[in-house]
Image (tube, helix red, strand yellow):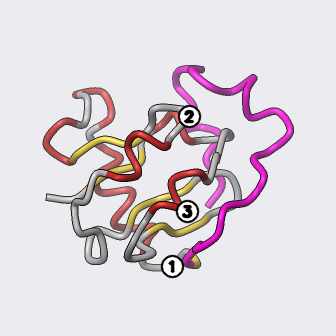
C-alpha cells in the first residue's frame, strides 16, 4: 500500500508533508504534489502534516478521488523530487476545500 495525494492539493500545494517524509517520495509539479508509489514506505507521517487534508492511504482514497491513485503514479515518473518545505502559493488558503479542481492541474 502507498499514500496518495488527492484533489485538495491542487492550487494549495502546501509542502509541510515534504519535511516529514523519511524517504523523499514527494514529487513537485507547478501547482500540485504527488507521491511516488515506488518510493513511499507507508509511514503515515505526511497525512497529519497536510493542512489541506489531501493525503490518503491508497485503500482509503474516497470513491470520487480514485483517479488520483494512477495520476500520482503517472506524474511521479516525470516530476522533480521535492525534499524541503517551500512557501505555499499566496492564494493557497482560498483554494483549500474547493471541489472539482482537476481542471486547474498544471502538468
Q: Which mark is residue 19?
A: 3
Sequence-wise, the earlier of marks 2 and 3 is 3
Sequence-wise, the earlier of marks 1 and 2 is 2
Q: Residues within 10 Å of mark 1 (few under 14, many from 20)?
A: few
Q: Which mark is residue 51?
A: 2
- Residue 107 percent coordinates (x, y): 61, 61
Rendered position, 67 above or below 77: above
- Residue 65 percent coordinates (x, y): 33, 34
Q: Secondary structure at mark 3?
A: helix
**The one of 81 and 78 positioned closer to us in this rendering:** 81
The image quadrant of residue 42 is: bottom left
To which residue does mark 1 refer?
Answer: 78
In whole angstroms, how far apart are the C-alphas of marks 2 and 3? 13 Å
In whole angstroms, how far apart are the C-alphas of marks 1 and 2? 25 Å
- The region drawn magenta spans 81-107
Rendered position, 39 above or below 96: below
- Residue 10 percent coordinates (x, y): 59, 41
Q: Is residue 103 left or right of residue 93?
A: left
Amino acid at each position: 500500500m502507498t499514500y496518495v495525494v488527492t484533489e485538495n492539493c491542487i492550487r494549495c500545494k502546501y509542502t509541510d508533508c515534504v519535511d516529514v517524509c523519511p524517504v523523499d517520495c514527494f514529487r513537485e509539479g507547478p501547482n500540485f504534489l504527488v507521491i511516488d508509489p515506488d518510493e513511499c514506505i507507508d509511514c503515515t507521517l505526511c497525512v497529519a502534516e497536510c493542512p489541506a487534508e489531501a493525503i490518503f492511504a491508497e485503500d482509503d482514497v474516497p470513491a470520487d478521488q480514485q483517479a488520483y491513485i494512477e495520476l500520482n503514479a503517472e506524474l511521479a515518473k516525470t516530476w522533480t523530487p521535492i525534499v524541503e518545505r517551500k512557501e505555499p502559493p499566496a492564494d493557497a488558503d482560498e483554494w483549500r476545500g474547493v471541489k472539482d479542481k482537476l481542471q486547474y492541474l498544471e502538468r
